Amino acid sequence: MTFVLIKTIHLFAAFIYGGFLIVDNLFLGQIKKSYDTEEHKAIRESFMKYVRKVVPPSLLVAVITGLYLITQVFGPISEEGMTSFQMLLSLKAFLGIWLGIRGFLQVYMGIQPLVFKSHVLPFSFVVTIIFLSQFMYI
């Protein structure tokens, strides 16, 4: 019962974070084409003031619940090495932890990323995590 509850919380938190990245990369970037710079800045800021309240905590919840879930499903490593499931799950965990550390440092510590200032790399990580989730059980 605990596993199912935490997995449900994890999925909802991941949907909130991933949904923001999808909207930001696919739609908000396109607004620049329809509005001048000042209007675009005002539209984006009105959207972001709500995003800042929900998305960073949901990212942290997704990472923390993901860490719990990995302890429940990873299993022992056999003498032959990790299974394909374990390798894909490890990659997925690495990407999720990277996103969590980046988000925590940026939002709560005020440390801006040195190289990756846009949401394109986190978006690509989220898309990769989604695909890994689909191939893990094959």
Image (cartoon, grey):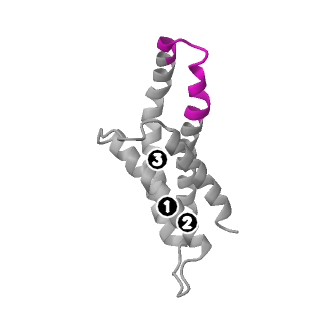
Residue annotated with mark 2: 89
Residue annotated with mark 3: 59
In the rendered image, the quadrant that contains the N terminus is bottom right
Q: Earlier in the sequence, mark 1 or mark 3?
A: 3
- Residue 43 tag number: none
Figure check: 39 above or below 126? above
Q: Secondary structure at mark 2?
A: helix
Query: Which amino acid, by three-letter code, is at mark 1?
Result: Ala
Q: Pointer 1 and pointer 3: residues touching (CB < 8 Å)?
A: no
Q: Pointer 3 and pointer 2: residues touching (CB < 8 Å)?
A: no
Residue annotated with mark 1: 93
Q: Position of residue 17 (x, y in %)?
A: 52, 43
Q: Pointer 1 and pointer 2: residues touching (CB < 8 Å)?
A: yes
Question: Magenta span covers which residues?
Answer: 23-40
Q: CA distance from mark 1 to mark 2?
A: 6 Å
27 in magenta: yes
User: Neighbour class for label 2 at 10 Å: few (<14), some, many (≥20)?
Assistant: many
Query: Which amino acid, by three-letter code, is at mark 2?
Result: Leu
In the rendered image, the quadrant that contains the C terminus is bottom right
Of 30 and 106, nearer the camera is: 30
Of 56 and 29, nearer the camera is: 29
User: Neighbour class for label 3 at 10 Å: few (<14), some, many (≥20)?
Assistant: many
126 in magenta: no
Query: Which amino acid, by three-letter code, is at mark 3?
Result: Leu
